[in-house]
Structures are given as structure tokens and as C-alpha cells.
Image (cartoon, rainbow, N blue to C red):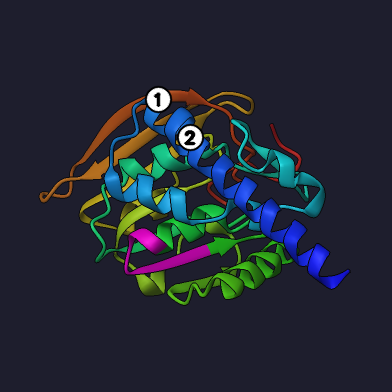
Amino acid sequence: MVHKTSQNNDERELALAAARERMVEQQLVGRGIRDPRVLEVMRQVPRHFFLGEFQMESAYEDEPLPIGEDQTISQPYMVALMSEQLHLEGGERVLEVGAGSGYQTAILARLAAAVFTVERIPSLAEKARMVWRTLGIANVRLRIGDGTLGWPEEAPFQAILVTAGAPNVPPPLVEQLDLGGRLVIPVGERFLQTLLCLIKRPDGSVERQESIGCRFVRLVGRHGWKTGEG
């Protein structure tokens, strides 16, 4: 009986690995993701680890999925696109606002030297920590709090990624971005945002680039949406 259970688990893992490869080829490469490091990490990190048992079969589908607390794990393409727009080379210190399930954090951890992530919901933070531990991810620091304030004690950051939709770009995040750094954030209305990439030039000026339309959960905090607002 134990042998049969082990065999079933092995078969499921093989099926999930095949689904992950299809995800990369069809959803990412097929839509224009080109950064080889991003593609390789998306092949490596098991998205299903960050989901509940009942969601396993949907883990590599082309959609966001609920993770509790009215939050979601982002669509794989969006995770890859936002990661690619940061132009990470491996030595950066990255600030992530909104750890959520921890999946995007795990991707960043494989692409950069260190990730500092702020999550406002303790239960999600604890679940994410457990999965990172299982995957052997040791270059992530997490704290509970208002992500719109950033993490000033650890600034500056060479890259900042925000995983929730904001009404405006939080000023503390721009302040904590290093010269030459990139800030990727969805900005707009409650149910529709535009993905922005802000680049801080050597003279301190900020270049703003618009990408695609998107829909994220609200970024709640002092410089985001207020609780119950929007």
C-alpha cells in the first residue's frame, strides 16, 4: 500500500512538472517572455507548492487563483512579465511589496541576491515562510506591515516589485529606489490598472514606462487604498 501511494505521488509530480513546462512554453515564451533567467526559474519553482491540495490540478493554468484572505496568487504570465521588467542580473537587493502566497517572492529569490518582502496579512506570511523553507530558499527576509511604506532601514533597493494595484505610486517606494533601479507596479482604478515600470536615472529623475492593462487586488496602506475603500 505504501509503495502504491509513493508511485501515485511520483506520477503526480511528473504530471505537474510536465504541466509546468507547458506553462513556460505556451503562456510565457508564446507571449513574448524572452529573459532566459526568468524562463529557467519559472521552470524550476513549483507553483503548486504555494496552493492548496484541492488546487493542484489548476496550478499551471493561465489564471490567478485564490489563496484565502481575499488574496490571489498571480497569473504565471504576470509573474514572469513583472520579473522580466526588473532586468535582474543576480546581484540585486529587491524589495517586494505583498508576499501573498510567496510564489513571486520565490521567483525573485532565484533571480537576485536578496529579497526583502513586506506582507500585511500574518496568516499568509506564515504559510509563505513554510514553503520557502521547504524549497530551501534562504535569501528572503519578511516582515509584517504596511508595504506602501517600503523598508527604509534596508534601502536603497536596486529593484522594487509591487504585487497589488495602487491608486498612485507610493512616494516612499520611489525614494527607496536606488539610482539606476526599476520599480514595477500596477497603478489605476480598483478593478483595472496599468502595469508601470519606473526607472530612476543617475540624476535622480524618474522615467515612467507603461506596459499592459492588468487587474490586481488592492494595495492597502497609508499610500495605497484605505481599508474598505475602492
Please name the residue shown 67% across and 59% down the image.
10
Cα–Cα gap, marks 1 and 2? 8 Å
59 or 17, nearer to the observer: 17
Residue closer to the observer: 15 or 202: 15
Residue range of the region highlighted in magenta in the rendering: 110-117
- Taking the spot 65% from the left edge, 52% from the top edge, the residue there is 48
Q: Is residue 206 left or right of residue 188?
A: left
Residue 170 % position (x, y): 45, 46
Which residue is pictured at 79% across the width and 69% down the height? 3
Q: Secondary structure at mark 2?
A: helix
Q: Could you tell me which quadrant the C terminus lies in?
A: top right
User: Badge 2, how many Cα within 10 Å: few under 14, some, many 20+?
Assistant: many
| Residue 212 visible, this orientation | yes
Q: Quadrant of the N terminus?
A: bottom right
91 relative to 150 in the view: left or right: left
Q: Which residue is mark 1?
A: 31
For residue 77, the mark is: 2
Residue 191 in the image: state x and y as whole percent. 63, 25
* In the foreground, 148 or 48: 48
| Label 1 or label 2, whichever comes before in sequence order | 1
